[in-house]
Image (cartoon, rainbow, N blue to C red):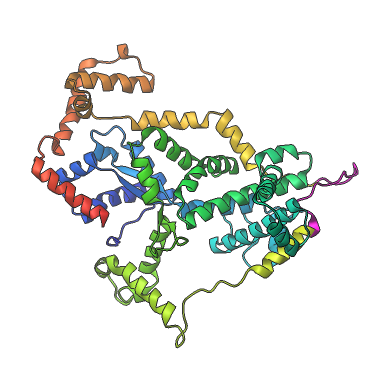
Amino acid sequence: MLEPVPMEEQTYGGNYAITKELPRQMKVDTDEKLVLWARNRMGPWTGDSLTIQRLRHLQRMKADDSNRLERMQHIIPVFGWMHLDMNLCNAIFYHHFSESSNSGLARDAAALGRSGLTKPTKSRGPAYHTVDEFMQHTTTARMRGLWLWASGTNTMEQLIAWEKESSPSIIAEAAQKIWLERASNRATQQFKSDPQLCNSIAINRELLLRHEVRYSMRHGDVGRMEHTLPQLLYFFSGAGCANYAREIAEVLHWRKYEAPPGVADLVRDECWLINTLGRSDSFYALDLRQELNNLYIKYHFEHGPPPQGCTWEAHRRWGPALPVFASVILHMDENFHDFYRSRKHYVPDPEEDIKLLLKRHAERRIHAETPERPAEAVQEKRHHDCFATGRVKIDEKGYLDAVAQERIEYFSNLSPLEIAKHDNISMEEAIQLKRREGMKAKGVTPQNTNNDTYIDEMLEENAEDLLYGYEQVDEEEYEDIRHRLGDGLDS
């Protein structure tokens, strides 16, 4: 953990200042070292959606600067999966709450009678812990109901007996039936004339997507997490979560077309999840680790300096050791909790709640086809189909093409000096090449510009590169800095 600093992250200026503070704490504190760091290393920066947006917009605003350091091309923005999961839970809860629907989540919330599961708004949903626990329980109950439906049994005891008597192929066929007929996009089209069943299928489909994300995060399966990105792109785009849809589109484009060889896999394997306990089911997102660090700094004064008269200097000294202090306190809580009130949270057994939901689902027959109704009967209203709406935006309106074109326009810039060195051409040729590419991106014809003026301006910009030490780096000093930076990043 680095030293806490009194810097805000709400503005672009605050985020830009932090990009300068991090190298300073890593002892990269001279122009020469900064240039070596920017030219020869790329570093992931993890955060929530707002932090990543700030970094990406900063890179766009500085895309025409003269070198990699000022263009911030050494920074790889990496979104946090914990904040993505929070947004996914709230979006599912919002679009499928539906108090008037027989299969909506409002009926499940009312049956459980838990506080906090009230009608959400688009901008504000329940607390993450509350909706996360509710999603797990209703998903379990609905999946049990689907297995009862697919196996032709009526009780869990009968289902257990069926499972023991059936061969693996029969169980696999039942799972395939559940997926194709009650939890897939195809099923929503197949039963679109039955609104109640179609709503139930849409809820099953999106609850399974969320379960896939959560399970793969908890067990460190980053490959499965990566495979959910296209589905999440469709869902967030259709659900109106434009920021996360854009972020996932940018990540997919960067991974496929822009990342240097091996870097995309390195970011996926090392920068998405963290495991501090060494157990197979104790992985969690890196942005959750940062939130815990913030918690230790702000509220858990027993981890750090006392609150009375505390200064930023005291926080700076204590900050790097806070995770160690927190681990010691957690260890004491787990082993010595009989003689004082422990802070450990014990999760109650959810089995009774799951059985209650399963009973209510069976009474409402949410997984069965609705029989023909009289013409005067009121039809249940269809929930908003996020995947169908997202498919229209992504496939038919050129969403990904627009994202790709914008990234090409902003992030393909190199300074003339870098182009000349990379392509082994003269500086004048590099300036002319950059000039033609810039005018082509802006739709300007070369005949309407003054070549001499443009070349003079580019030569003035190129002089700034020399101020950052492009031609002043000693080879031995470079190797020493490179090794020290590697040691700092590894630790």
Residue at image position (18%, 29%) is 462
Residue at image position (61%, 50%) is 208
Point out residue 124 in the picture as x, y percentages from the top left corner: 57, 55
In the image, residue 370 lies in the stretch drawn in magenta: yes
Whether residue 455 is visible to the viewer of this picture, yes or no, is: yes
Whether residue 381 is visible to the viewer of this picture, yes or no, is: no
Above-or-below relation of 103 to 340: above
Point out residue 273 in the picture as x, y percentages from the top left corner: 41, 54
What span is in magenta? 363-379
Q: Nearer the viewer, residue 358 or 219?
A: 219
Q: Nearer the viewer, residue 376 or 447?
A: 376
> Quick one: quadrant of the C terminus?
bottom left
In the image, residue 453 lies in the stretch drawn in magenta: no
- The image quarter containing residue 449 is top left
Q: How many marks?
A: 0
Residue at image position (36%, 34%) is 258
The reply, left or right, for residue 301 in relation to residue 94 is: left
Above-or-below relation of 256 to 120: above
The reply, left or right, for residue 434 in relation to residue 188 is: left
Q: Nearer the viewer, residue 185 or 164?
A: 164
Q: Residue furthest top?
A: 447
The dominant secondary structure in magenta is: loop
Q: Nearer the viewer, residue 226 or 60?
A: 226
Residue at image position (43%, 28%) is 405
> Quick one: quadrant of the N terminus?
bottom left
Point out residue 438 in the picture as x, y percentages from the top left corner: 32, 23
